[in-house]
C-alpha cells in the first residue's frame, strides 16, 4: 500500500473519531439538534416548491 492512501485513511478515521467525541458533548448535542431542524426546514421548502 502506498503512503498516500494510508494518510487519507488515517485522516478519515480521525475525522470520524473527533465527530463522535464532539457529538457526545452538550455543545455537540445542541449543534445536532439545530442541524436536524435546518434539514427539516429545507425538506419542507423543497416539497413546497414542488406544489407551486
Image (spheres, rainbow, N blue to C red):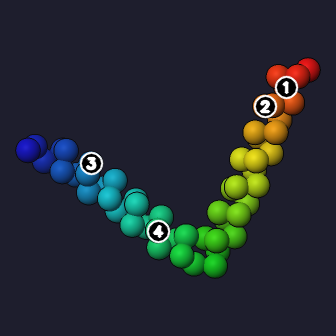
- Residue wearing tag 1: 49
Q: Counting residues from the N terminus, which is met first, the one under dot 4 or under dot 2?
A: 4
Residue appearing at x 64%, y 79% in the figure: 26
Q: Label 3: which residue?
A: 8
Separation of marks 4 and 1 at Cα, in angstroms:
35 Å
Residue nearer the viewer, 5 or 41: 41
* Tags 3 and 2 touching, CB below 8 Å: no
The image shows residue 47 at horizontal and vertical percentages of 81, 31
Q: What residue is shown with label 4?
A: 20
Which structural element holds mark 4? Answer: helix
Q: Is residue 40 left or right of residue 23?
A: right
* Residue at x 48% of width, y 64% of height: 19
Instruction: Please name which of the two marks, 4 or 1, marks the residue nearer to the observer.
Output: 1
Depicted 45 relative to depicted 5: above or below? above
Residue 34: x and y in percent read 73, 60
Determine the residue located farthest toward the bottom in the rendered image: 26
The alpha-carbon separation of the residues under discs 3 and 2 comes to 35 Å
Residue 35 placement, left or right of 13:
right
* Badge 1 element: helix
Tell which circle, 3 or 2, labels the residue nearer the N-terminal end.
Answer: 3
Label 4 Cα neighbours within 10 Å, binned few <14 / some 14-19 / many ≥20? few
Locate the C terminus and report the quarter of the image it occupies: top right
User: Which is in the foreground here, disc 3 or disc 2?
Assistant: 2
As measured in the structure, the alpha-carbon distance from the residue carrying label 4 to the one carrying label 3 is 19 Å
Residue sitting nearer the eye, 51 or 17: 51
Place residue 31 in its image quadrant: bottom right
In front: mark 1 or mark 3? 1
The image quadrant that residue 5 belongs to is top left
Give yes or no for contact between labels 2 and 1 (Cβ–Cβ under 8 Å). yes
**Residue on which disc 2 sits:** 46
Amino acid at each position: 500500500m502506498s503512503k498516500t492512501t494510508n494518510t487519507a485513511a488515517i485522516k478519515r478515521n480521525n475525522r470520524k473519531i473527533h465527530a463522535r467525541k464532539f457529538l457526545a458533548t452538550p455543545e455537540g448535542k445542541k449543534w445536532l439538534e439545530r442541524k436536524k431542524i435546518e434539514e427539516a426546514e429545507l425538506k419542507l421548502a423543497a416539497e413546497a416548491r414542488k406544489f407551486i
